[in-house]
Amino acid sequence: MQISLLQWNVWYKEDPDKIIQLIKELNPDVICAQEFIQHSKLQPPLDTAKYIADKLSYKYFFQVSESWTNRPEKETQGNAIFSKLPIVNKRFEYIQPPKTNPVNAAEEGRVYVELTVEKEGKRIIFSTTHLSYTPFFEMTEQRKNEANNLLEILKKKKQSFIFTGDLNAAPDSFLINSINNLNNLKHLGPDFSEKTWTTKPFDKDGFAENELNWRLDYIFGTKNIVVEEIKIIETDVSDHLPIFARLVI
């Protein structure tokens, strides 16, 4: 049984119609994605995950990770999983508790989102998260705690399970090494040498980057997942490059 998957941090500042156009071209069965926003006071009200799902006729599950009362461009932000396949279960778990008006990215809530879908009588679990940013992606004590909370979830998964995310962590980081050392999961690709960030100029908290020098986005799966094709998609839509995969389960 083959399933196509797209992992993508869509960048909350991006035009949703540009995101829709690339998704149309790739036509994945499942999309695991980060940085969707909502704002009820705009006219019309803004809800990027719902807008994309409605335009493309996907079923979806969105969960808020943090909220603001003092930002004009967004009230909430979170992660979503979209599916063309029937959804049989959905759940979420906070890796870092949500906060209102976090003062920096390290204080923002972080949510793990999970969706179980069914195809040809088989159930497959897709999951995703978006972990905290720190300058130069330093693995601080706060980030190690966040990583350990995620690892506690991942190590319990047995089979037909796929995990994706913008982990804000380099391939040689504590987090990625720890996931690679789990007995139940494997990195599905592409090779860690291939980069996914950044396509846009970035300057925050004393860290500036203008080139595609970092790998921050990943797909992992249980041992029964077979990779038929996996590649990073070249695009100027979003500040992250998406990863597209065809998987056999």
Image: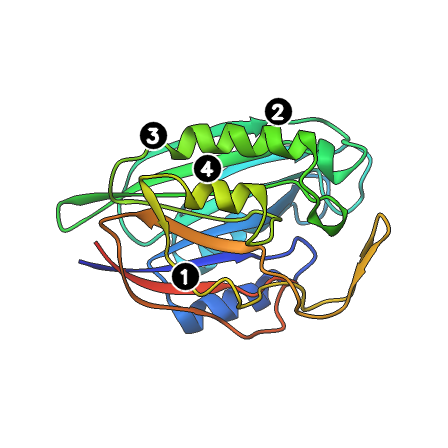
Q: Amino acid at mark 3?
A: Lys
Residue at numbered disc 1: 189
Q: Is residue 180 left or right of residue 116?
A: right
> Mark 2 packing: few (<14 Cα in 10 Å), some, or many (20+)?
some
Callout 4: SS: strand
Upstream in the sequence, badge 4 or badge 3? 4
Residue at point 69% right, 34% down? 108
- According to the image, what is the colour scheme of the structure? rainbow
Residue at numbered disc 3: 156
Upstream in the sequence, badge 2 or badge 4? 2
Tag 2–tag 4 contact (CB < 8 Å): no
Task: Give above or below for 173 relative to 195.
Answer: above
Res 17 quadrant in image: bottom right
- Please state which of the two labelled residues, at mark 3 or mark 2, is closer to the viewer: 3
Callout 2: SS: loop
Per the rendering, the mark at residue 82 is none
> Mark 4 packing: few (<14 Cα in 10 Å), some, or many (20+)?
many
Residue at numbered disc 2: 97
Residue at point 62% right, 24% down? 97
Residue at point 26% right, 53% down? 225
Alpha carbon distance from label 4 to label 1: 21 Å
Q: Position of residue 100 (x, y in %)?
A: 73, 27
